[in-house]
Image (spheres, rainbow, N blue to C red):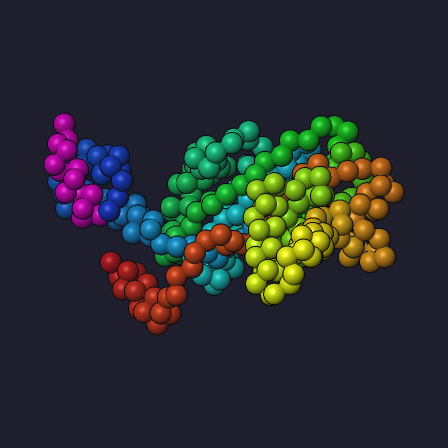
Amino acid sequence: MVSADLIKQLREMTQAGFLDCKKALEQNDCDLEKAAKYLREKGIAKASKKAGAIATEGMTLVNVCGNNGVICEINCQTDFSANNQLFLALGDEVKKVLVEKNVKTIDEANAIILPSGQSINEACQELTTKIGEKISLRRFVKIIKQDEQDFGFYQHANKKYSALVLFSGKISPLLAKNIAMHIVAHNPKFISKANIDQDWLINETNVIKQQVLASGKPKEFADKIVQGKINKSLGEICLYEQNFDFAEDKKISTILKENNVEILKFIRYELGEGIAKNNVDFAAEVSQQMNSNHE
């Protein structure tokens, strides 16, 4: 029987998880030094040190198979590691299994077993140990379409941007891809004016109204000016209102109407969006990694 006190001591020594420490002690006759060595050899202790690191580099990936489509983001800490072949191979494995499994949460996704026999989380931990950077599956969205519907998808060459689009009907693969590419390039917030988030609209209206009033415009004209600015903004951020990159004289809405389809949903991922980045002293980071490699 492993005591809670021993587990606590081992956790303080290695920063590994409770269950990992318990298992290490059980397999090493409750010897703290042997258990700590066991965790280092397994890479668990070293990986745990990286758990609190901020990983903002990596790749976004998109995959479609039959009626299933998935878009995901896998992170590492540096752009250099984002081009590591082991990291790229892990990304290919992850996007293949994600499109096959019906999971909804990141915890469920991390528990999916890869062809190697490891879970996604275990594979990320092992690669963390090999590369020396935090590796993690950050997010994903899975869409299941009906037989009469179609997907469009695009993954930029640098893997920093991806888009997955669900169409209401059948559409040519090239046009579907080009619309997904347009979404990556122009980053629309909404499909159309009918799909605008009301909280966003109220907030944007208030911000613009304060700007107009602060500029000294007469109050009696403020509402008309605000509405004009809102309409202009909506024309820029609503996908249907944007001019199509591959036919600049036509709006996206016109292209879709000509092809008898509508866009039901789109997901656009940009690498690292929403993550607060730390300003890191590069020389200090290299020194830290060199020292950790000698542990």
The location of residue 79, given as percent across then percent down, is 49, 62
Taking the image as shown, residue 281 lies to the left or right of residue 167, namely: left
Q: Quadrant of the N terminus?
A: top left
The location of residue 22, given as percent across then percent down, is 21, 34
In the displayed structure, 52 sits above or below 265; it is below
Which of 122 and 109 lies nearest the eye of the viewer? 109
Taking the image as shown, residue 21 lies to the left or right of residue 266, namely: left
Taking the image as shown, residue 87 lies to the left or right of residue 33, namely: right
Magenta stretch, overall SS: helix
Q: Is residue 295 visible?
A: yes
In the displayed structure, 94 sits above or below 232; it is above
Q: Which range is magenta?
A: 1-14
* Quarter occupied by residue 65: top right
Q: Residue at x 59, y 36 (%)?
A: 142
Which of 275 and 6 lies nearest the eye of the viewer? 275
Q: Quadrant of the C terminus?
A: bottom left
Q: Residue furthest right?
A: 258
Which of 6 and 138 lies nearest the eye of the viewer? 138
The location of residue 50, given as percent across then percent down, is 33, 52
Q: Is residue 130 visible?
A: no
Q: Residue at x 43, y 35 (%)?
A: 107
Q: Residue at x 30, y 64 (%)?
A: 288
